[in-house]
Image (tube, helix red, strand yellow):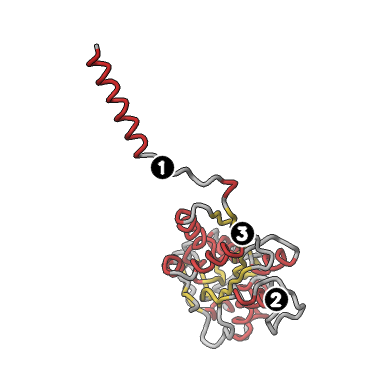
Amino acid sequence: MKRIMTVLLVGMMILTGCGKNEEKPADVKVEDKKEIVVFAAASMTESLEEIKGKYESENPAIEIIYTFDSSGTLKTQIEEGADVDIFISAAQKQMNALDIESDKNEDQLDFIYSESRIDLLKNKVVLAVIEGNEKGLSSFDDLNTDLVEHIALGNADVPVGQYSEEILGNMGIWDAIQPKVTYGSNVKEVTTWVSEKSVDCGIVYATDAYSAGLEAVAEAPEGTLKTEVVYPAAILKNSENPDEAKAFLDYLQGEDSKGIFESVGFTMAK
């Protein structure tokens, strides 16, 4: 009997000891996590979501919260007092309008830390069609022919819409194609219409064509786009966690993020 009790006692001690050795650190409580709120251009959705997963796994005390929309809409929300740590725009125009040190800030708005501002990414503007290209489109010149009945563009408040107008204006066909145009509130809406065959084609970023599984049949003709497609990023002055925001902004410029951005067609600005 004593022998049986001894064996049982030793077994319990072994099991207890194993349990202690395998004990894992407790997860960070949700209420103890610091949130980094990021307002970013809709064209960054897929790449930033992937980066979020990697960053949060490496930094369990941080939670990244995104809002994706057109840069113009996000800028307006910032002006109206939205609590934001980082803003990433798809064009310089919207960032300039919030940067007191910019000579293009007509309203003298002061929302970002100018010293934190960086040029993060570059993109390309392309003519996108459904996979298979049933209309046989091959260039921006096709937009002003009978091959195209309906085209989707971003509206004037969306950077890709502004780039589209610049391209088509410099080609001399902007006015002529207006009867064919349907305007989207952001670039994702444009890609959706192309994917659903609601339109024959759309002008979007190369990264969005890739993410939506569309075929990019042409890049903007040489000389028609004077403005380089650059995505600036900055920390907001009302950031509640500026140090953590800076750390994440640094991470977006690092090698891990670079690989993700380049996999969908972005190039690093620096």
Q: Which mark is residue 37?
A: 3
Label 3 to label 2: alpha-carbon separation: 20 Å
Residue carrying label 1: 24
Front one among 56 and 2: 2
Residues at discs 2 and 1 in contact (Cβ within 8 Å): no
**Quarter of the image containing the N terminus?**
top left
Give the residue type at disc 1. Answer: Lys
Q: Is residue 17 visible?
A: yes
Residue sitting at x 68%, y 76%:
99
Mark toward the viewer: 2 or 1? 1
Q: Which mark is residue 97?
A: 2
**Kind of element beneath mark 1:** loop
**Kind of element beneath mark 2:** loop
Crowding around mark 3 (Cα neighbors within 10 Å: few <14, some 14 to 19, many 20+) is many
Seen as rendered, the residue at the extreme left is 3
Residue sitting at x 60%, y 46%:
31
Front one among 51 and 190: 51
Q: Which mark is residue 142?
A: none
| Percent position of residue 88, x then y | 59, 69
